[in-house]
Image (cartoon, grey):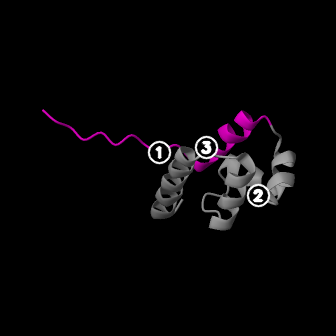
Amino acid sequence: MTTNFDPPLVSLAGWLLRARYAAGITQEELSDLSGVSVRTISCLETGRVTRPRQTTIRELIVALRIDLEDTRSLNLISRNCSKNGS
């Protein structure tokens, strides 16, 4: 018996929070590095903003020095959020 298992994608909020913690920086420091406002970063991490602009995501990726594999994961998460309207 074969079943298709499609594990749920992690949320954009969770991904960003984990990436920032892994980098060992505060929201303020990430804001300084990326040019994204602290308010936007906070809203992304708490899930109040689920469909950020692609430029915002790019700025965060560069600032956090995210590797290619993590970037692919983030792109999948972003597409999933857009499709679900969340």
Alpha carbon separation for disc pair 3 and 2: 15 Å
Disc 1 marks a residue whose amino acid type is Leu
* Side (left or right) of 86 relative to 60: left
User: Which residue is drawn at the image coordinates 25% and 41% (left, top)?
Assistant: 4
Residue 80: image x %, image y %? 47, 56
User: Which residue is nearer to you in this view: 68 or 86?
Assistant: 68
User: Which residue is drawn at the image coordinates 83% and 41% (left, top)?
Assistant: 26
User: Which residue is nearer to you in this view: 65 or 3?
Assistant: 65
The answer to whether residue 80 is magenta is no
Residue 73: image x %, image y %? 51, 48
Residue 71: image x %, image y %? 56, 50
Residue beneath label 1, please?
9
| Secondary structure of residue under mark 2 | helix
| Secondary structure of residue under mark 3 | helix
Q: Which residues are magenta?
A: 1-24
> In the picture shown, does residue 26 fall above or below 47?
above
Disc 2 marks a residue whose amino acid type is Thr
- Location of the C terminus by quadrant is bottom right
Residue beneath label 2, please?
40
Dot 3 or dot 2: first in sequence order is: 3
Tell me the tag on residue 15: 3
Q: Nearer the viewer, mark 3 or mark 2?
A: 3
